[in-house]
């Protein structure tokens, strides 16, 4: 199982939210590149980079952060937050990202998403699903749709490679992951490469996720709050 540290960006700074609430925002670093280098120096080779300004504005805002981290680290980056157009997608990859994570548009414009999956390949386009009680949320987690995560995955069946699923109720809480949800997703859709996100509180959570069979897990606040020592991640 791969460990993917997360860097969430607001105003060019590295932050974490609690349950997706922009009003509960804590700044951890004014220098995202410095944070990315710390992860790289610890032996991690992947990064989940999210433009929270972009997610809220429905259009990428923090291009400079993406370009800087791609240029000055060797991390394999998946980038999301406000990716809505062909130009956005092209620019994400031209900046040096290895993956583009699409969330809201995967729900609101499946035709466009399908075109990207065909053009760039399902290995490079990650379907991101932020869920609240299994219902998919869009527009920076501000709007809860009537679509369940299961319905969303079913609609892309046969075309989806990577699925990043974040349980918003657990995100930033550090009180355990949505292990039951991930177990059910893998039972119903064993072919997907599932990336778990939200609620990791320690290495015990990581071990549990590994046993369930998720391919990777995004870790954010537990790293910033030093609930998990970067050196301990080598075991995974």
Image (tube, rainbow, N blue to C red):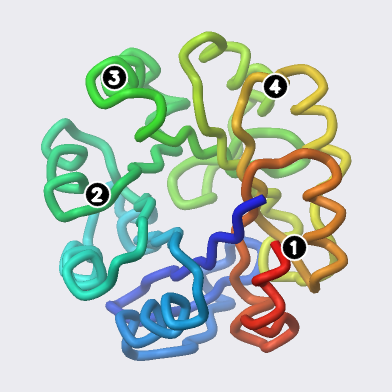
Residue assigned mark 1 = 199
Neighbour tally class for label 4: few under 14, some 14-19, many 20 plus, Cα within 10 Å: some
Q: Position of residue 53 (x, y in %)?
A: 33, 63
Kindly identify which numbered label has been placed on residue 57: none
Q: Alpha carbon of mark 4 to alpha carbon of mark 3: how far?
A: 20 Å
Of marks 3 and 2, which one's residue comes earlier in the chain? 2
Quick check: marks 4 and 2 in contact, CB under 8 Å?
A: no
* Residue at which label 3 appears: 112
Mark 3 or mark 1, earlier in chain? 3
Foreground pick, 61 / 37:
37
Where, by quadrant of the figure, is residue 135 drawn? top right
Q: CA distance from mark 3 to mark 2?
A: 15 Å
171 or 32, nearer to the observer: 32
Closer to the camera, 213 or 27?
213
User: Mark 3 to mark 1: distance in Å?
Assistant: 31 Å
Circle 3 sits in a helix, a strand or a loop, which is it?
helix
Dot 2 lies on which element?
Answer: loop
Which residue appears at 35% of the width and 52% of the height? Answer: 79
Q: Mark 2 = which residue?
A: 59
Residue that carries the numbered disc 4 in the rendered image: 150
Q: Is residue 111 left or right of residue 133?
A: left
């Amino acid at each position: 199982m791969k460990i993917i540290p997360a860097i969430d960006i607001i105003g060019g700074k590295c932050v974490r939210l609690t349950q997706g609430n922009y009003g509960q925002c804590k700044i951890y670093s004014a220098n995202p590149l410095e944070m990315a280098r710390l992860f790289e120096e610890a032996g991690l080779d992947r990064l989940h980079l999210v433009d929270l300004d972009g997610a809220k504005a429905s259009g990428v805002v923090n291009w400079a952060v993406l370009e800087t981290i791609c240029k000055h680290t060797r991390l394999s980056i998946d980038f999301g937050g406000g990716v809505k157009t062909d130009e956005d997608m092209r620019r994400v990859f031209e900046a040096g990202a290895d993956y583009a994570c699409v969330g809201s548009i995967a729900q609101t414009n499946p035709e466009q998403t399908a075109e990207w999956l065909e053009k760039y390949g399902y290995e490079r386009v990650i379907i991101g699903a932020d869920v609240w009680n299994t219902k998919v949320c869009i527009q920076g987690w501000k709007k809860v749709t009537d679509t369940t995560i299961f319905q969303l995955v079913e609609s892309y069946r046969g075309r989806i490679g990577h699925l990043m699923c974040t349980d918003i109720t657990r995100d930033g809480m550090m009180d355990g992951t949505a292990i039951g949800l991930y177990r059910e997703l893998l039972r119903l859709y064993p072919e997907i490469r599932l990336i778990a996100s939200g609620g990791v509180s320690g290495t015990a959570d990581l071990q549990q996720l590994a046993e369930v069979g998720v391919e990777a897990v995004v870790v954010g606040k537990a790293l910033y709050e030093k609930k998990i020592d970067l050196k301990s991640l080598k075991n995974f």
